[in-house]
Amino acid sequence: MRASLILGALLSGLALVAALVSFIWTPADVTQLAIAQKLLPPSGQHWLGTDHFGRDMLSMIMVGARTSIAVALVAVGIGMGFGVPLGLLAAARGGWIDEIVMRGNDLVFAFPSLVIAILITAALGPSALNAIIAIGIFNIPVFARVTRGAALPIWTLDYIRAAQVAGKGASRISTQHILPNIANLLIVQGTIQFSLGILAEAGLSYVGLGAQPPTPSWGRMLAEAQTMVALAPHVAIIPGLAIVVTVLGLNLLGDGLRDALDPRLRRSP
């Protein structure tokens, strides 16, 4: 097993464990304000210090992990749920169906993903749900293009032609033969989009279009801390590190999974 896979799993698992534990326990109530204890440095009482409202930073990071992971996970689910069938359909049918799917993808890719997300959330209103919709919409053409690109070469193989001769239809071949053979690629792509989803959620929250108060969010924590960096650097450094560590972990996990799942990249012992 590659070191990147182990390290990525550990870093990603750290964020996941923090998010899961936050459902049942946090060191302090994230909605409880204690102005008298604002901007305290890390100590035995507050391991990561407190923010400008006196809230415990460790508790904020834990609940913020829950928000970021939930938004990114559902957004990736939306992308895969719609994009994979579209990609399989385009590869199986070809012709004008393929052309419509691909031109629709090109239309979405013509705009930066964060700009599209900002436009959608600005139109629908700032909330975690609308952030999920915005990020999920951009994920659809990503998975559609990856699925189509991986499926097209498989349609030329002999065993697929044998399945066609046996009377299997395009949809049955796609689900029984094509999808299992590209599942590893989709898993790796899902991991990558998961990390990008966390970045997108942080960006939307940073500009006030993501999860709204009192729900903690890493991006909004950074936005609120930018004017207090000189007074209390930890209020900006800690959420920034949380984003960096989580995204780095997911990217390393994606690289490790790619090497582990793709037989062409496996090294002999």
Image (spheres, rainbow, N blue to C red):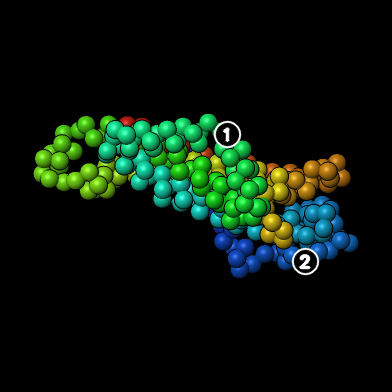
Label 2 Cα neighbours within 10 Å, binned few <14 / some 14-19 / many ≥20: few
Residue in the image at 36% along x and 40% along y = 87
96 horizontally vs 159: left or right: right
Vertical arrangement, residue 158 with respect to residue 51, above or below: above
Viewer-nearest residue: 172 or 223 = 172
Numbered badge on residue 222: none
Residue at disc 2, secondary structure:
loop
Q: Is residue 79 above or below residue 106?
A: below
Say which residue appears at 79% left-offset and 56% top-offset.
50
Q: Residue at x 63, y 48 (%)?
A: 123
Expressed as whole percent of the image width and height from the top left, the position of residue 80 reads: 42, 47
Badge 1 density bin: few <14, some 14–19, many ≥20, Cα 10 Å: few
- Furthest toward the left, the residue is 166
The extreme front residue here reads 96
- Badge 2 is on which residue? 32
Residue toward you, 41 or 105 = 105
Q: Amino acid at mark 1?
A: Pro
Q: Amino acid at mark 2?
A: Gln
Q: Which callout, 2 or 1, points at the residue further toward the start of the chain? A: 2
Quadrant assignment, res 214: bottom right
Q: Quadrant of the C terminus?
A: top left
Residue identifier under label 1: 112
Q: CA distance from mark 2 to mark 1?
A: 38 Å
In the rendered image, residue 53, in percent from the top left (x then y), is placed at 82, 58
